[in-house]
Amino acid sequence: MKFDEMKVLEKSIVPIYEKNCIDGSNFHEPVIDARDIWEFVESKSQFSDWIKYRIEQYGFHENADYCIFSEISEKRGRPANRYIVTLDMAKELGMVEANEKGRMIRRYFIEAEKRYRELKIIRARSKAERRLFTDILKEVLPESPHKNWRYKQFTDLVYKHVTGYNAKQLREMYGKPKDFNVRELLSPQQLHEVSRYESIIQGLLQLGQDYQGVKAILDNPAAFLPEKTA
């Protein structure tokens, strides 16, 4: 993954991104570009001196606390390193500045950590709801050689209504492998919408609708609402 392919989670005091964990696992974590921290705290040192000194001073470890992207600098036209750091390291970088800007950015990262802990809980709940959804599909859909394909049809129908893209397109957009869980790419609001659509589909299937019927209702729900009487 390149730096410019990382998903932006929020832009406030400094941008917070999301990427595969720095330790190389396929899980996700919020990360920060150390240069953004350096600029915010208004350090008098050159960035490369500042980050290297902090790493040595506090014993941060590459591929545990931070990772490095080597890119061509737009300003200088030669290779430059981006230091992408975990939230824990970002908090420490703020704390050790020992000034108001450092304290401010540390508080910001602490609050961000709380938000993304909640996001993990939301995603875990969404995965459980997904299992319930597939269990109901197994019960309701008739047995056939194409039953697994039907699961994909309904899943893609949900994702297209929520994001505008199917599961394959979402994975390709973010450079993820075929077996990557698409829900990891969605915001809390999108996950809520996915659950809402899955609940609607469950109800429609249990009422006897097939895929085409479900799709028609989701695509144009107003056409299926009863007309109001005067």
Image (spheres, helix red, strand yellow):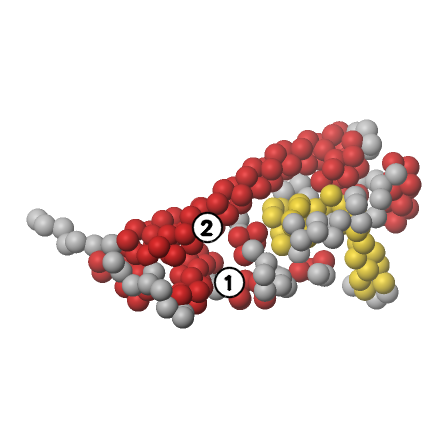
Q: Nearer the viewer, residue 191 or 55?
A: 191
Residue depicted at 65% across the width and 50% down the height: 27
* Dot 1: element: helix
Q: Could you tell me the amino acid type at mark 1? A: Ala
Instruction: List the residue tagged with mark 2.
Output: 130
221 sits to left or right of 69 = left
Res 143 → quadrant: bottom left
- Across and down, in percent, residue 127 comes to 50, 47
- Image: 71 above or below 16: below
> Where does the image place residue 63, in percent across and percent down from the top left?
80, 49
User: Of 107 and 175, which appears nearest the observer?
Assistant: 175
Can you give x and y, in whole percent of width and height, for residue 78 in the image?
86, 65
Q: Residue at x 48, y 45 (%)?
A: 128
Percent coordinates x, y for residue 125 in the rendering: 49, 42
Q: Amino acid at mark 2?
A: Arg
Q: Mark 1 highlights which residue?
A: 167
Crowding near pointer 2: few (<14 within 10 Å), some, many (20+)?
A: some
As drawn, 34 above or below 174: above
